[in-house]
Image (cartoon, rainbow, N blue to C red):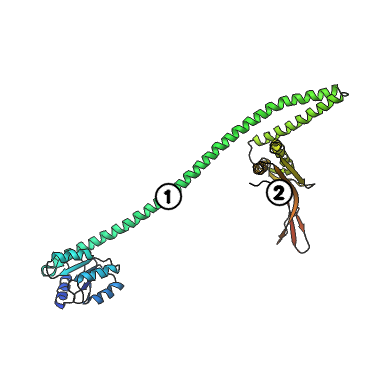
Amino acid sequence: MDNQANKIFIVEDDEDDAFFIKEILSHPSSGFPPLITHVETPTLALERLSNNTFDICLFDFRLGEMDGINLIRMVRDMGVEFPIILLTGQGDEEIAVEAIKAGATDYLVKSKMTSSSLDKAIRYATQLFKEEELRRITEIKLLKSCEDLSSTNQELKVSMLKLQTAQNQIVRADKLASIGRLAAGICHEILNPINIISGHAQALKMERPKDLPLLQDLDSIMEEVSRVEKILTGLLKFSRDEAIEIKEVDLIENLNSVLVIMEKEFLHNNIKVDKYFENGLPKIEVDADRIRQVFLNIINNARYAMNDGGTLTISALIVYKYIQIKRRSADVSDQVQTDNGVSFKKFLRISFSDTGLA
């Protein structure tokens, strides 16, 4: 046995046999003499085992009120895992098989038991118990590793999905950038002849100032040229690939530039646009390109909801929201302060509503 005092639990109702076993155990071949606990009945054995730990247990087969095999079953049902050696008075193989099935670690025949054989059996049972404990711990660690691996695999799948989504977005952004560059090139190519047409129209107006029918036609041409220029200018603004730039912009001006681009779509879909813009609206610090994209997305959503025609209503006005001021700010240009410490903060609200059903 190891060089330490092992705790041995003996269940034996025969005093002579108990004395014999203790005598053998008191002279181990190596190490320290064990700490022996001895009880005579299964009832006491169950009580002690429910509250104490031992390195090994020695159960006699014949215990009066029950045999050692039934005691082993009850002990194992309690969840006690200590190694157990069954001691029998005769070498009955059937008893040995039943004992192993019930949960015994080993068995010994008392008539053939010596200090050496008992010491060897205890060593074997103790080593087997340690190996079983190690196997159990290894299984728990393996199960935990499998769970961690499964969790990691799931996280990897989610990461792969996010990566695939990001790659698709990159491809889409690259396509949009290419389309933007193409649109910018086309806009510039169209603007060149438009400028020439505009120049010739202005020249004709100066050459024929008294030809009223011609002047009317030229004004009509100039009006359409101006409309085409607005549309192309709006497209050029959307085709720019620029970094975010926050500055004061006129939101209504940017909103109108988007509406100009959508004008043809509205006419084709029989959509009417009603605008209600308050006078003297302030400029707002935003990124102009991004806010135009926001306006375009909202207006497009409204258009798709009104395939059979309808009305898109857009309003812009100043609103005031109540806020409680705990400490006066250095910048109160957007606040209306009252005597009792209550403030109403100023906001620019732009509202979109449509008559679509979708």
Q: Quadrant of residue 17?
A: bottom left
Q: Nearer the viewer, residue 284 or 313?
A: 313
SS at badge 2: strand
Label 2, residues with CA under 10 Å away: few <14, some 14-19, many ≥20: few
Q: Which residue is denoted by mark 1 in the rendering?
A: 152
Q: Give the vertical position of 141 relative to 106 (above or below).
A: above
Q: Position of residue 190 (x, y in %)?
A: 69, 27
Residue depicted at x 75% and y 62% = 341
Q: Are marks 2 and 1 in contact (CB under 8 Å)?
A: no
Q: Which is in the foreground here, disc 2 or disc 1?
A: 2
Residue 351 is marked as: 2
Q: Nearer the viewer, residue 231 or 171?
A: 231
Residue type, mark 1 in image: Thr
Q: Give the vertical position of 121 relative to 159 (above or below).
A: below
Q: Position of residue 313 (x, y in %)?
A: 72, 46
**In this rendering, does residue 305 appear at all?**
yes
Q: Quadrant of residue 19?
A: bottom left
